[in-house]
Image (cartoon, coloured by chain):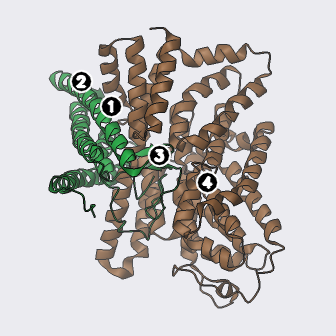
Amino acid sequence: MSVGFAVLLVAGVMAVLLLLRMPVWLALAISGAAGLLALRDAKFVTSSLATASFEQASSFTLTIIPMFILLGVFAVRAKVAEQVFTIARRAFRNIPGGLGISTVAACAGFAAVSGSSIGTAATMSKLSVTEMRKAGYPTSLAGALVAVAGTLGAMIPPSLFLVLYAILSSESIGKMLIAGIVPGFLSAVAYAIYVYFRTRKLPQIADDATLEVGLNEAISDSQARGQRLRLPWRGLIRLIIIFVIIMGGIYTGFFTPTESAAIGALAALIMLILEYRNRGIREITRQLNEALKETAKTTSMVFAIMIGSALLSLFFVVARVPQMISDSVTGLPLPPWLIVALLLALLLPLGMALESISILVITVPLIYPVAMELGFDGIWLGIMIVKLIEIGMVTPPVGINCFVVAGTAKIPTAEVFKGIWPFVLIEIGLLVLFFVLPDLILWLPAVVQ
Amino acid sequence: MTTDASSASSRFLRGAAQTFAAPLGALGSISTVAMMIVTTIDVVSRNLSGSSVPGLIELSGTLLIATVFLGLSYAGAANAHVSVDLVTSRFPVSVSRRLAGLMWLLGSAMTVWFIYATAVRALASFQMREIATGLVDWPLWPARWLVVIGFVAFLVIALVNSFLGLRGEPLLGEDDEDDDSEHPSPSEAPPSTTPAPAFRAAPHGTEETS
């Protein structure tokens, strides 16, 4: 069978299986195996199945993935998000849009202990969407803000997406994680500035706002303005401890990224136990049990996708697809920056149709070699790709964060999508900024030991 | 909670599948905790005594295998494997479920191929007493058999899902009530409170997913 036909076959099989709701990892594995079978023989495919299964899940370096998942799960249950939000509310209480800015700050803070954007969005939507609506924020703004600020979880380390990109591209995991700090921070600042200007004219945000929220640890506006409120500083301290363990370890070279993830998870476990120490051993055991079950499911799901993508990637290599793309695009009478920009732009429609991890595992083996051939930096490319995936997570029809916020906060999904477009414009503006000024991303990882 | 239309055989299969997968998930969870402890011990040892504990890095690799593959069936039974329902959510429920059943049947066939491939490799590894050479000689064949066990367990779940789906019934985990909705999962899938939207890239999972 010709290579061209095999590529078409694989693309067709993958598209059909994905759209007919086959689990993503099986769809990737079947399409990859079908392509390999078309170009080689059954013996080669059988051997590849065994190799991919074992190699994708037996390396010490890869233990960073379950450790980051475990860390995030423990941090959620240790109520770090609630506590950081409470402190942020107090800090920004006198600023117009303070509630929205607090939400962004809490999302950024929680992102620093959680590698998941959905986890961040789900946690924060419970805390802040209702409160923002009661304070007069349009539902569309309140929902969209949490959805988009939740994507900070995918950028600010520890980030599963950055780790997966580093593994797929063989870039340094430590440098990749460090590289996410500045873009994540700038994104948070950009969202906050937008909220400031957008909510300045809202008359409903008044001093006498009397608000209630559903969670004990969160506070109302009137409480936030009170002077005698006891703030849960332990949340901020815990956040700083975990962030210092992870980033400090990587930055100084004291720990490897994998080791820092394990130690961070252990620290988060201790924090969870401390948080529930007054509620008895039974409650602690229940929290641990639930946390570990979540971790086991998520870890298996992520690695299964990696196994499926390994087969697909092997097909790409055997069929020389990256070389074909590279030869095609480098031959175009276009400057390299435009070629890479066009390749990256393809991720936008993909993000509107596919689940985020799938986009990463399918596109990185194709785009990365081309960008390297054209002389671009792999760390910079990773940030750009993850940023584009973030946009896919909030744009219809499959903007997963919007559905999470809508479901958790009990607001219409259409409202969240309605409010998302200004943030998408901000995201695109940030992308252009990072594209034009790559040193914004690269200066920090350049100083990592 | 199963639907009224569920037959006794479906209910039995659901219960059996959950009972079968839960202990494997628990073992996977224990492996995760062990991984965390082992890695921490290694760091402490390296910084106190100047050297790693022999075998701990290799042990971590084996524990990762246990976490991933023992959890594979648990994730399947909890409906946590991500899928895209961009198209099928537009179909009538009965059609959508039967399509899902068909996809799981196809997935079962692929899993059989995985089982064959990994079993052949595990057998060869066992016969040659395959080891990884590092600070210690670490046997690899137990981990290779764990992979086989994980795929076999997943096949059971895949077949149950095929059966349920082809009968037009909810897949495993689709009808679970979220018993712990206070804490959203930090993974990349929506929580159980997420309503079924017109379009979404969703995990099958009700509790979670990056």
Q: Position of residue A268 (x, y in %)?
A: 45, 63
Q: What separation in Å lies between label 4 and label 2 (alpha carbons)?
A: 41 Å
Q: CA distance from mark 1 to mark 4?
A: 31 Å
Q: Residue at the location (75% across, 15% down)? A: A332
| Residue identified by numbered label 3 | B85
Q: Dot 4: within a 10 Å radius of its alpha carbon, few (fewer than 14), some, or many (20 or more) residues? A: many
Label 2 sits on what residue type? Arg
- Please give left or right for residue A238 compared with residue B149 in the image: right
Q: What is the spatial separation of the Cα atoms under label 2 and label 1, in whole angstroms?
A: 10 Å
Q: Are marks 1 and 4 in contact (CB under 8 Å)?
A: no
Same chain assignment for discs 3 and 1 = no
Residue B124 place in picture, x, y as percent: 19, 21
Circle nearer the viewer, 4 or 3: 3
Q: Are marks 4 and 3 on the same chain?
A: no
Return the disc, 2 or 3, that comes first in the chain's sequence.
3
Residue beneath label 1, please? A54
Instruction: Tell me which amino acid carries mark 3.
Output: Asp
Q: Is residue A385 left or right of residue A263?
A: right
Asked if residue B86 can be seen in this view, the reply is yes
Hue of chain A?
A: brown
In the image, what residue type sits under mark 4?
A: Thr
User: In this figure, which residue is indicated by the disc labeled 4?
Assistant: A151
Mark identifier at residue A358: none
Look at 70% across and 49% down and name the residue there.
A183
Q: Are marks 2 and 3 on the same chain?
A: yes
Mark 1 or 4, nearer chain start: 1
Inter-mark Cα distance, 4 to 3: 22 Å
Please tell me whether residue B54 is drawn above or below residue A281 in the rendered image. above
Report the disc number at residue B121: 2
**Location of the C terminus of chain A (image quadrant):** top right
- Chain represented in green: B
Q: Are marks 2 and 1 in contact (CB under 8 Å)?
A: yes
